[in-house]
């Protein structure tokens, strides 16, 4: 089932962004002292609205799915605990589950905060005039990919179980490497 979900998500993402490579244009800029080639994307107003919607959707949908599924897991665990252990109220069990699984709630929030620069850049449709602005936009663009590179830190490090498994795995790998020498 999960393989199909991954495949469908991959195909859906490609299909929702297919308009971008179709609409790209290269424009040659002959300046007095420089020759530049600019890549522009020009959309009609309807395609621009679609692109804005898709950008927001791809930004908010994963966050919403992560938060909702984390809350469902926490609430379900609290209900099950309250059904088995009657010594504590449902509210107490819920509080305990939130404390125990807080990392599941923190990760999507951290990712959405780290992804905000990319969202802002995608909605900033300004032309660059000076020679210094392209670097600012380029640096901001590359900084916006930091969340993708921080997935390990955001998801594995806050979880005690994942961190323990990672340490055990690295210890196992280092032992294998030491014995092969």
Image (tube, rainbow, N blue to C red):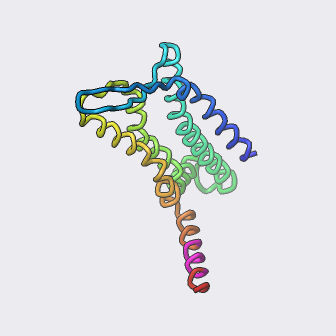
User: Taken as a whole, is the magenta stretch helix, strand or loop?
Assistant: helix
Occupied quadrant, residue 35: top left
For the point 58% across and 73% down, the residue is 168
Q: Which residues are magenta?
A: 169-176
Question: Between residues 24 and 154, which one lies in front from this camera angle?
Answer: 24
Figure quadrant of residue 39: top left
Question: Measuring 44% from the left and 45% from the top, which residue is drawn there?
Answer: 145
Residue 51 in percent (x, y) is at 51, 23
* Image quarter of the C terminus: bottom right
* Residue 177 part of the magenta segment: no
Left or right: where 49 falls relative to 32: right
* Quarter location, residue 40: top left
95 or 146: nearer the viewer: 146
Residue drawn at the location 52% of the way across and 59% of the way down: 156
In the image, 107 versus 127, the foreground residue is 127
State the residue at coordinates (54%, 33%): 58
Please state the total of marks drawn on the protein image.
0
Q: Position of residue 142 (x, y in %)?
A: 39, 44
Residue at the right extreme, as displayed? 1
Q: Position of residue 100 (x, y in %)?
A: 53, 57
Q: Residue 180 location, x and y as percent?
A: 61, 84
Quadrant for the N terminus in the image: top right
Q: Nearer the viewer, residue 109 or 88?
A: 109
Based on the picture, tell me whether residue 173 belongs to the magenta stretch.
Answer: yes
């Amino acid at each position: 089932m999960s393989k199909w979900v991954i495949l469908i998500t991959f195909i859906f993402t490609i299909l929702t962004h297919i308009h971008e490579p179709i609409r790209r244009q290269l424009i040659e800029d002959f300046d007095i002292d420089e020759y530049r080639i600019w890549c522009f994307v020009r959309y009609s107003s309807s395609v621009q609205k679609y692109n804005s919607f898709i950008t927001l959707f791809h930004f908010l949908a994963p966050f919403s799915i992560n938060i909702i599924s984390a809350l469902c897991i926490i609430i379900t665990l609290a209900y099950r605990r309250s059904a088995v252990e009657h010594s504590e109220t449902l509210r107490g069990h819920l509080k305990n589950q939130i404390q125990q699984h807080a990392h599941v709630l923190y990760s999507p929030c951290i990712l959405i905060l780290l992804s905000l620069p990319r969202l802002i850049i995608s909605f900033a449709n300004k032309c660059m005039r000076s020679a210094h602005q392209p670097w600012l936009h380029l640096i901001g663009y590359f900084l916006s990919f930091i969340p993708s590179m921080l997935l390990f830190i955001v998801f594995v490090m806050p979880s005690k179980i994942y961190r323990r498994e990672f340490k055990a795995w690295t210890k196992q790998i280092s032992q294998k490497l030491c014995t092969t020498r």
